[in-house]
Amino acid sequence: MELYLFRHGIAEDAPSGSPDSARELTDEGREKVADVIRLVRRAGTQPAVIASSPYIRALQTAGIAAKEFDYDGEVYRLDSLVPHGTPERVWSDIRDFAHEPSVLLAGHEPLLGTLAGFLLNTPSLRIDVKKAAVIRIDIDVVKAHPHGVLRWMVAPKLARSLSDV
């Protein structure tokens, strides 16, 4: 299974009295998300499933990904993908998609950085996942504990610099 860990794009500051979960992407955030998706699509990426944190900015990121990939399936909402979620809960949810060849997960830091380490069976590994960055990790066998292989990571600056190539 190919797993794509996709951090949401730049989001607005939370208005006073509004929950963090209601923050939306800025125009710049939307542009950077689309830039990254266009680049990884050119590299042959096509998720069979897209899932997202229930937070607005992650759902918007997943929606942009769905549009750019011409994905017409359901965008699944996974409560495990919230910023304070645990890698173990996300892994439990991922295992529900074990029959799928590729899954894109739209989420947040610090979860995605720790999830990457967990999936690579190196829980002490710390990965700084920038906003609108995507990481590909391949899992050969979906079982109790993951043993993934890091294939690549694309950050928005790289996507933008390669967009004219």
Image: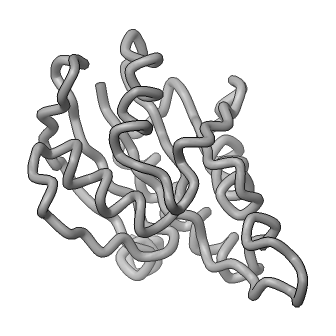
Q: Quadrant of the N terminus?
A: top left
Q: Position of residue 95 (x, y in %)?
A: 38, 20
**Nearest the camera: 161 or 164?**
161
**Nearest the camera: 93 or 130?**
93
| Left or right: 22 in relation to 159 | right
Residue located at (30% from left, 75% from top)? 128
- Seen in the picture, residue 123 relative to 129 is either above or below; the reply is above
Q: Quadrant of the C terminus?
A: bottom left
Count of number-bearing discs: 0
Residue located at (39% from left, 44% from top)? 4
Q: Quadrant of residue 152?
A: bottom left
**Nearest the camera: 16 or 4?**
16
Q: Quadrant of residue 126?
A: bottom left
| Left or right: 45 in relation to 113 | right
Q: Quadrant of residue 103?
A: top left
Q: Position of residue 155 (x, y in %)?
A: 38, 72
